[in-house]
Image (cartoon, grey):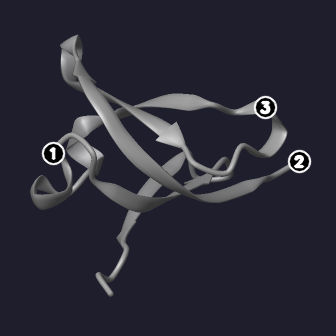
Amino acid sequence: MTYRIEETVKVLFHLNEGYTKVFVERNPGGLADLDIPTENIPRHLRRIGSRFVLILEDRESEIRVVEIPEL
């Protein structure tokens, strides 16, 4: 079984060992926050409070980040 999660997240804080805690803004399936590898986040989106779309796909164990254009 494969899945794809595509949700807007907000950077909460940075953890040790190269991970970043992000908050899932829309809470599908009970997810509230996730720890993702900081290296997967472009440098300009790593600051606390940054928002972006996080795409997780299990078939490739892939994590992608898509910038949200400013209005």
Residue 68: mark: none
Residue at 78% x, 46% y: name it.
Answer: 28
- Residue 51, how many percent across, how many down? 36, 57
The answer to whether residue 65 is left or right of residue 14 is: right
What residue type is disc 2 on? Met
Q: CA distance from mark 2 to mark 3?
A: 19 Å
Which residue is found at the position 20% from the left and 24% from the top?
A: 18
Q: Give x and y (percent) for residue 25.
A: 58, 48
Decide which of tag 2 and tag 3 comes sooner along the chain.
Answer: 2
Local packing at callout 3 (Cα closer than 10 Å; few below 14, some 14-19, many 20+) is: few
Q: Tell me the quarter of the image containing the C terminus.
A: bottom left
Q: Secondary structure at mark 1?
A: loop
CA distance separating discs 3 and 1: 25 Å
Element marked by disc 3 = helix
What residue sits right under mark 3 in the picture?
Answer: 30
* Residue drawn where x is 27% and y is 53% of the image: 50
Lateral position of residue 68 relative to residue 58, left or right? left
The residue drawn where x is 37% and y is 75% is: 68
Q: Amino acid at mark 1?
A: Arg
Residue at the bottom extreme of this rendering: 71
Q: Residue 30 sits in which quadrant?
A: top right
Nearer-N-terminus badge (2/1): 2
Q: Which residue is mark 1?
A: 47
The residue identified by callout 2 is 1
Q: Dot 1, how many residues are within 10 Å of its Cα: few (below 14), some (14-19), or many (20+)?
A: some
Residue in the foreground of this view, choosing between 40 and 26: 26
Q: Nearer the viewer, residue 4 or 24?
A: 24
Circle 2 residues within 10 Å: few <14, some 14–19, many ≥20:
few
